[in-house]
Image (spheres, helix red, strand yellow):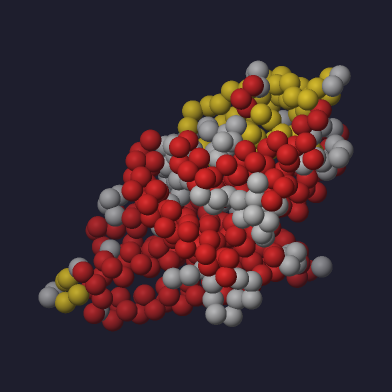
């Protein structure tokens, strides 16, 4: 399987070269360690550095900052190949999102310092929006950043933060003016390596995504320079988040597609080798019809995702279309995981079979990045406008 479809207008020769390089890298360096990463709850630092040396995180960043001057199609390829091997441990999706916050809104100094380190894997990034009492409602966040001379004092906490346990750099959503609602929201870069008053909670135990570290973050009067503000002035955070959320949601849809291809491959191999009543499971009409449904829905999503990537590369991807990709992609992903697990019978319930953890990992896709209920509301607003 390939991310690309014959009608897709965005891939060029370079995208296929990157896809091939990512596929070989993951086969050699990631697949043998997926089980270990899932047990230990995080990915080794060395893997981040190896991925950096392989150039996997550099495709969509200008050469001036250590990248290869391409577009988000290159990130899309790597994310798809990552999901296609069944991995949810390596937090590259969030790393890509953080990279593009810095690239799009950072000052020259911020970009010059952080981007080469993020691309190399020396620095691991996290995006901290959700709070213990606030999920999709970004206007209701309570973490504050108060100006004190040439510093901000940050107080509050964040919940469910992917890469949170490992992160060296946190793009932090705060209220710089709590009285102004969405207009008082700002993004601030926090270097966790020297932030007094910053601490991490334990790695959270989750239904799935066992190898991807997720943590609660605490800020107790953490001091950061005013120059760590992302953007030219305070109060731009909500706008910045809204502009970047389409990429975050498309990341989730691309991941869903890769996982669906992985599940189909695993299931086809299983039903061809497993027998019941003297026949291969593959030879039963129910099996063949179910796989036909899985294949069709996968190809429909592939076509739509490719269309979204092409629009993203042209700077034309709308918020509602990214919401459709996230909503439909993750709903379809969860349906496919359920059908494929059923075809495995009792073995599908055993965690040594990849379909079991593909099933468990899929469930959160309908929640993070904005719940699918929020996605439907955003789509409905575009119809009603």
Q: Which residue: 69% across, 65% down? A: 313
Q: Where is residue 286 in the image (x, y as percent from the top left)?
A: 30, 78
Q: Which residue: 72% across, 61% down? A: 319
Q: Position of residue 231 (x, y in %)?
A: 82, 41
Classify 57 as above or below 279. Answer: above
Q: Quadrant of the C terminus?
A: bottom right
Q: Which residue: 70% across, 52% down? A: 62
User: Which of the 4 image quadrants contains residue 264?
Assistant: bottom left
Left or right: residue 41 compared with residue 342: right
User: Which of the 4 image quadrants contains residue 70?
Assistant: bottom right
Q: Where is residue 1 in the image (x, y as percent from the top left)?
A: 44, 71
Task: Tell me if residue 219 can be seen.
Answer: yes
Classify 45 as above or below 365. Answer: above
Q: Which residue: 84% across, 21% down? A: 150
Q: Position of residue 252 (x, y in %)?
A: 57, 56
Camera-nearest residue between 213 and 19: 19
Camera-nearest residue between 225 and 134: 225
Task: Tell me if residue 125 can be seen.
Answer: no
């Amino acid at each position: 399987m390939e991310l690309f479809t014959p009608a897709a207008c965005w891939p060029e020769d370079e995208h296929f070269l990157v896809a091939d390089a990512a596929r070989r890298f993951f086969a050699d360096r990631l697949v043998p360690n997926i089980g270990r990463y899932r047990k230990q709850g995080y990915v080794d630092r060395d893997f981040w550095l190896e991925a950096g040396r392989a150039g996997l995180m550099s495709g969509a960043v200008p050469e001036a900052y250590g990248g290869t001057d391409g577009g988000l199609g290159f990130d899309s390829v790597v994310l798809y190949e990552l999901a296609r091997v069944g991995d949810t441990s390596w937090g590259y999706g969030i790393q890509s999102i953080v990279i593009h916050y810095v690239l799009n809104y950072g000052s020259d100094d911020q970009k010059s310092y952080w981007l080469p380190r993020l691309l190399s894997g020396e620095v691991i990034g996290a995006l901290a929006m959700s709070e213990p009492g606030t999920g999709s409602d970004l206007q209701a966040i309570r973490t504050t950043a108060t100006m004190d001379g040439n510093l901000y004092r940050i107080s509050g906490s964040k919940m469910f933060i992917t890469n949170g346990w490992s992160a060296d750099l946190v793009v932090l959503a705060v209220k710089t003016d709590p009285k102004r609602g969405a207009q008082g929201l700002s993004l601030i870069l926090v270097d966790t390596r020297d932030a007094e008053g910053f601490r991490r909670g334990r790695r959270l135990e989750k239904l799935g995504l066992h190898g991807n570290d997720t943590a609660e973050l605490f800020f107790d009067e953490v001091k950061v320079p005013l120059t760590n503000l992302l953007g030219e002035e305070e109060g731009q955070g909500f706008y910045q988040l809204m502009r970047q959320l389409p990429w975050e949601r498309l990341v989730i849809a691309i991941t869903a597609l890769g996982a669906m291809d992985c599940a189909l491959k695993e299931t086809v191999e299983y039903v061809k080798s497993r027998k019941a009543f003297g026949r291969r499971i593959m030879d039963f009409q129910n099996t063949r019809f179910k796989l036909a449904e899985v294949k069709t829905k996968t190809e429909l999503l592939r076509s739509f995702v490719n269309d979204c990537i092409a629009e993203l590369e042209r700077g034309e991807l709308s918020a509602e279309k990214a919401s459709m990709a996230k909503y439909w992609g993750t709903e379809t992903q969860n349906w496919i995981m359920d059908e494929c697990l059923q075809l495995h019978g009792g073995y599908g319930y055993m965690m040594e079979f990849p379909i079991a953890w593909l099933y468990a990992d899929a469930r959160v896709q309908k929640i993070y990045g904005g719940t699918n209920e929020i996605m439907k509301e955003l789509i409905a607003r575009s119809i009603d406008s």
